[in-house]
């Protein structure tokens, strides 16, 4: 039993450290103790660090303590006051027809507790249907960093729920930016693949088909990701699925956009790249 407890504790610590790495945070740096944080007057977010492009802020409630160090479970970003020229280079503030970003709420739901991945792991036989989560539950698997950064840079956005209800909205935009929209309805798939200029910013998009029940506020897995047959990979049999190997390149050191018939795809998973790399954001703007 003692051994089991040690294993569980070790897994928990590794998970938390993994989250801090995902945010690009140095877990060894000294930070204020919790008492000092709580005494900050009228403060909800505190400044955690400063990247080359954006300031990083965290909510004191999102800290956990590991070996005397406080580690944030999630973070947000803000523009730096002295980088207005840089933001004019990488932002789309002055564009009349701004690119439209599709926020992957359905994918966040699939990855949530009692979601599809509990079914895949054999933990839950009924989890092919799961509740739709709110936008504040976006994570690494649902492009949380990209959603925040692109909003700061002036991009328009809608959720995949809005797109599902009104697929014709895509016709109003010259350029659509798809994030890690892994789980989509057939209606969404048809609307996206028929648009002439989609930027597939994350690999593994359009990978599995779902249905949606707006009365029950649930999504259900229909086809894909080895379901209902283990031999089924892409749920739409889409020939341009770039899951392997691109989804597993998280560093994006050799990022590249390449052409497909209705737009461009990226060859890596840019969740850590998107808030650090000016040239990457400039290239995205110019596509």
Image (cartoon, rainbow, N blue to C red):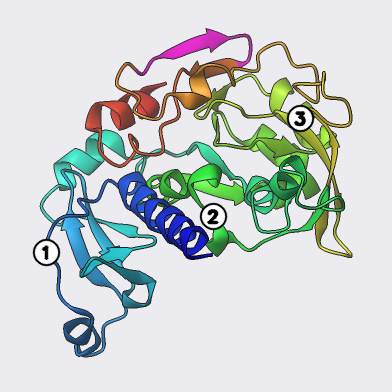
- The answer to whether 195 is drawn above or below residue 72 in the figure is above
SS of the residue under disc 3: helix
| First reached walking from the N terminus: tag 3 or tag 2 | 2
In percent of width and height, residue 208 lies at 76, 32
To which residue does mark 3 refer? Answer: 189
Q: Position of residue 160 (x, y in %)?
A: 68, 46
Q: Residues within 10 Å of mark 3 (few under 14, many from 20)?
A: many
Give the number of the disc on residue 30.
Answer: 1
The secondary structure type at the circle numbered 1 is loop
125 or 215: which is nearer to us?
125
- The alpha-carbon separation of the residues under discs 3 and 2 comes to 21 Å
User: Which one is closest to the eye, mark 3 or mark 2?
Assistant: 2
Q: CB atoms at circles 1 and 3 under 8 Å apart? A: no
- Magenta-highlighted residues: 255-262
The residue that mark 2 highlights is 138
Circle 1 residues within 10 Å: few <14, some 14–19, many ≥20:
few
Label 2 environment density (alpha carbons within 10 Å; few <14, some 14–19, many ≥20): many
């Amino acid at each position: 039993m003692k051994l089991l407890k040690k294993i569980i504790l070790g897994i928990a610590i590794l998970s938390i450290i993994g989250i801090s790495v995902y945010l690009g945070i140095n877990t060894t740096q000294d930070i204020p103790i919790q008492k000092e944080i709580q005494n900050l007057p009228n403060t909800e977010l505190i400044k955690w660090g400063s990247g080359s492009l954006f300031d990083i802020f965290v909510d004191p409630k999102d800290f956990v303590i590991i070996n005397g160090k406080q580690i944030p479970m999630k973070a947000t970003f803000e523009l730096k006051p002295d980088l207005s020229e840089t933001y004019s280079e990488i932002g789309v503030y002055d564009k009349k027809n701004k690119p439209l970003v599709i926020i992957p709420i359905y994918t966040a739901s699939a990855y949530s507790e009692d979601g599809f991945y509990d079914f895949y792991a054999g933990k839950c036989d009924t989890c092919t249907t799961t509740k739709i989560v709110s936008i504040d539950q976006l994570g690494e698997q649902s492009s949380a960093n990209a959603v925040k950064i692109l909003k700061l840079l002036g991009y328009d956005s809608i959720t995949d729920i809005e797109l599902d209800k009104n697929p014709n909205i895509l016709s109003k935009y010259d350029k659509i930016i798809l994030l890690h929209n892994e789980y989509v309805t057939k209606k969404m798939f048809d609307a996206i693949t028929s648009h002439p200029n989609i930027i597939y910013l994350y690999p593994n998009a359009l990978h599995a088909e779902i249905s949606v029940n707006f009365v029950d506020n649930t999504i259900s897995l229909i086809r894909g990701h080895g379901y209902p047959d283990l031999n089924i990979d892409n749920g739409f049999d889409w020939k341009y699925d770039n899951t392997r190997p691109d989804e597993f390149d998280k560093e994006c050191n050799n990022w590249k956009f390449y052409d497909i018939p209705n737009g461009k795809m990226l060859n890596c998973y840019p969740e850590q790249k998107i808030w650090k790399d000016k040239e990457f954001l400039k290239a995205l703007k110019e596509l």
